[in-house]
């Protein structure tokens, strides 16, 4: 299965999540590629949309190779090889820099802190796809630390082993497509897979916040 773009993927994913609408979920979209997908899910479920920016910690000699991932808050999630063999001072600095960047992005994109958005609620974590799932696992840790009552991971495409691993860490995993063999890169599941720019993220979050205010106003008027 290939999706035309992230919006089409989001619409397909939203159909698979319709059973969650009555639970009044909060959609937590991973930046940046997960935001267009999450925006479609949030609109369909009439749910708030929040952005979350997990950051990878790269190997000191091979920055492209991620050894761990972390969000603004929550635990550091190590890759399969672990982080015990790395210099503790270097690792602490890398973690601090990654958390600072995650915080900067949240402030730049706007929106509430994670705790005020998800505490006591169902958090639906959305991305445009998964490969190893390392950043998604950091996102799971962050929403759990922020007090989410339940956690669902929802993506258009993911490999089976990643889905099975995440299923042991959250309440539910929803993936529209689980190709076998996995093509190796998320972009292969899309016809158009352009980079999502910061301006698009801010626009989608702003539109979601306007919908939320309008929905709250309608609810107040009818009560």
Image (cartoon, helix red, strand yellow):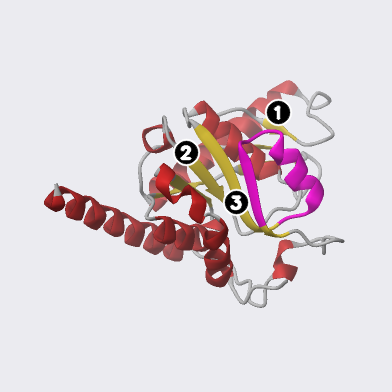
In percent of width and height, residue 150 lies at 52, 34
In percent of width and height, residue 15 lies at 53, 62
Q: Earlier in the sequence, mark 1 or mark 2?
A: 1
Q: How many marks?
A: 3
In percent of width and height, residue 25 lies at 43, 44
Numbered tag placed on residue 122 in the rendering: 2
The residue sitting at 39% across, 37% down in the picture is 113
Q: Secondary structure at mark 2?
A: strand
Magenta region? 158-175
The N terminus: image quadrant: bottom right
CB contact under 8 Å: marks 3 and 1: no
Relative to 92, say whether 66 is above or below.
Answer: below
The quadrant in which residue 185 appears is bottom right
Task: Please name the residue that numbered disc 1 is placed on.
Answer: 90
Furthest residue toward right: 181
Task: Please name the residue that numbered disc 3 is placed on.
Answer: 154
Relative to 52, say whether 182 is above or below.
Answer: below
Q: Secondary structure at mark 1?
A: helix
Q: Earlier in the sequence, mark 3 or mark 1?
A: 1
């Amino acid at each position: 299965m290939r999706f035309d773009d992230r919006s089409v993927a989001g619409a397909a994913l939203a159909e698979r999540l319709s059973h969650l609408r009555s639970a009044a979920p909060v959609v937590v979209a991973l930046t940046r590629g997960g935001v267009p997908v999450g925006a479609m899910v949030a609109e369909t479920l009439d749910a708030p949309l929040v952005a979350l920016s997990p950051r990878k910690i790269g190997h000191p000699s091979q920055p492209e190779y991620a050894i761990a991932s972390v969000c603004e808050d929550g635990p550091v999630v190590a890759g399969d090889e672990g982080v015990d063999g790395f210099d503790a001072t270097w690792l602490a600095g890398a973690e601090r820099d990654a958390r600072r960047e995650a915080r900067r992005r949240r402030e730049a994109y706007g929106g509430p802190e994670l705790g005020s958005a998800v505490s006591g609620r169902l958090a639906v974590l959305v991305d445009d796809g998964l490969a190893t799932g390392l950043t998604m696992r950091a996102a799971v840790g962050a929403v759990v630390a922020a007090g989410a009552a339940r956690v669902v991971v929802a993506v258009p495409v993911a490999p089976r082993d990643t889905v099975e691993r995440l299923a042991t860490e959250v309440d539910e995993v929803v993936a529209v497509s689980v190709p076998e063999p996995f093509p190796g890169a998320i972009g292969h599941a899309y016809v158009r897979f352009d980079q999502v720019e910061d301006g698009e993220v801010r626009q989608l979050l702003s539109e979601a916040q306007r919908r939320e205010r309008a929905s709250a106003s309608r609810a107040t008027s009818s009560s």
